Image (tube, grey):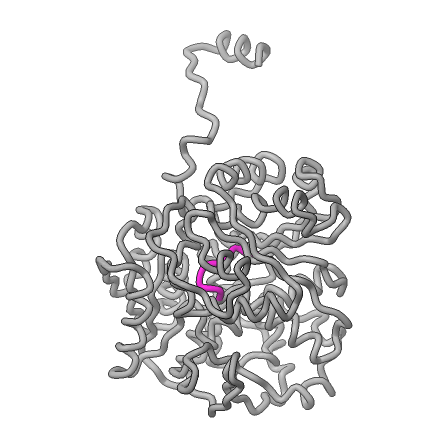
Amino acid sequence: MLEKLYLVSLMRNSIKLVCSKCKKEYPFNPKLARCKVCNEPLEIIYDYESLSARIKRHVFENRVQNIWRYIDLFPIKEDRNIISLHEGFTPLLKAEKLGKELGVYNLYLKDETRNPTFSFKDRGSAVGVSVAKEFDFNAVICASTGNMAASLSAYAAKAGINALILIPGGVSEEKIAQISIYEPMIFEVGRPYPELYRMVFRIIEKYDIVPIHSDSPLRIEGQKTIAFEILEQLDWKVPDWIIVPTSSGGNLSAIWKGFVEFHTLELIDELPKIIAVQSDGCAPIVKAFKEKKESVEPWGEPKTIAHSISNPNPALASGNRVLRILRECGGYAEAVSDKKILDAIRLISSKEGIFAEPASATSVAVIDTLLNENVIDRTDYIVSILTGSGLKEIKSIKNVARKPIKVKSLEEIIEKWIHT
């Protein structure tokens, strides 16, 4: 049961939608996600002047330890509409052994595997489904390669509303099982993910259904809380770098928005730099960044085990917005090989006890490259976002895990143990 502490938000602010590129403004509408002029993502903007007068660091003390401690910065008017599975406020762990192995002294892991459906997507699903409920919608929709589909299905089930899920072929059995157990309507579409993304918009044009896809404004609002939590967990110290596994670019955009909002509210005096990391088997954002382009071009067929970040055409979502953010913050973009990803999964598990999926591990796998390229310094404060659990992608990583030693007796156990 949600605590009455949510009632501390006494005055929900007037909000509007603003284009992340051309800055055209629109009245708030849960179904509206992209600018009608330039087709770039819209963002929810609040009355920050009013908020700054009453939101200080101390107001978050003693609030619930989930994303709803930040309800002042959500587009929710009525507490009774909140749908929560106690998502958020995941651990920020000082990775001392892993940092020593990699040669960095201040490495932190934001462990998003601890969310209810084992990925960061729960933050956005919670806010999105809550807004859908508040506006009396009875259905939500997304196109997904797995994590978002499972998350949205879970929150729709909790809210008692329908979920329409579009997935491409090739989604892991583990993820399909997790999605289907919540009993949404799932369509496996034999087309590339970008085409599924377009289908979502065609569906919402004709039917009363709310899109809570990879970079919808509602999802961004929930996922920006990753930044809020990092600041609180570091006692308001701003990290030098945030490393974000990047597919469509929605989560990176959300995390940046979170830091910018707290900076606008004068809760912090500076902003971090963001690093977008992709697999070298699907790295359209990295390619565009390094070629100093204004927009992201389609990649072609992805070839990587990091399926969660294998969107070959992120320009349809937030890819171009990511390029703008990286330029604004002085950030960087880099890609890593599948081999480095697998090595990082083993390192994160064996050194820090966290089982991360391949996409998550890219935020660690890239660190040695960043050091070699003199992008980061060994003394920098670095936060790597671990976006989802390794249990979602067993097939990709089972061949690198240590195999059981087969024995038939206690004597064999002792003999093999002593001699290893």
Is most of the magenta stretch helix, strand or loop? loop
Quarter of the image for residue 7 reads bottom right
**Residue visible at 65% across and 54% down in the picture:** 383
Q: Is residue 110 left or right of residue 190?
A: right
| 253, 181: nearer the viewer | 253
| 227, 246: nearer the viewer | 246
| 9, 186: nearer the viewer | 186
- The residues colored magenta run 244-249
Where residue 381 appears, x then y in whole percent?
Answer: 73, 53
Q: Is residue 33 visible?
A: no
Q: Is residue 181 above or below residue 11?
A: above
Where residue 348 appears, x then y in whole percent?
Answer: 58, 40
**Residue visible at 69% across and 79% down in the picture:** 264
Q: Is residue 290 visible?
A: yes
Q: Is residue 279 above or below residue 51?
A: above
Q: Is residue 263 left or right of residue 391?
A: right
Where residue 224 appears, x then y in whole percent?
Answer: 57, 69
Asked if the magenta segment contains residue 337, the reply would be no
Asked if the magenta segment contains residue 246, the reply would be yes
Q: Is residue 174 above or below residue 85?
A: above
**Residue visible at 74% across and 87% down in the picture:** 53
Where residue 225 appears, x then y in whole percent?
Answer: 59, 68
Q: How many marks?
A: 0
Q: Is residue 393 left or right of residue 23?
A: left
Q: Quadrant of the C terminus?
A: top right
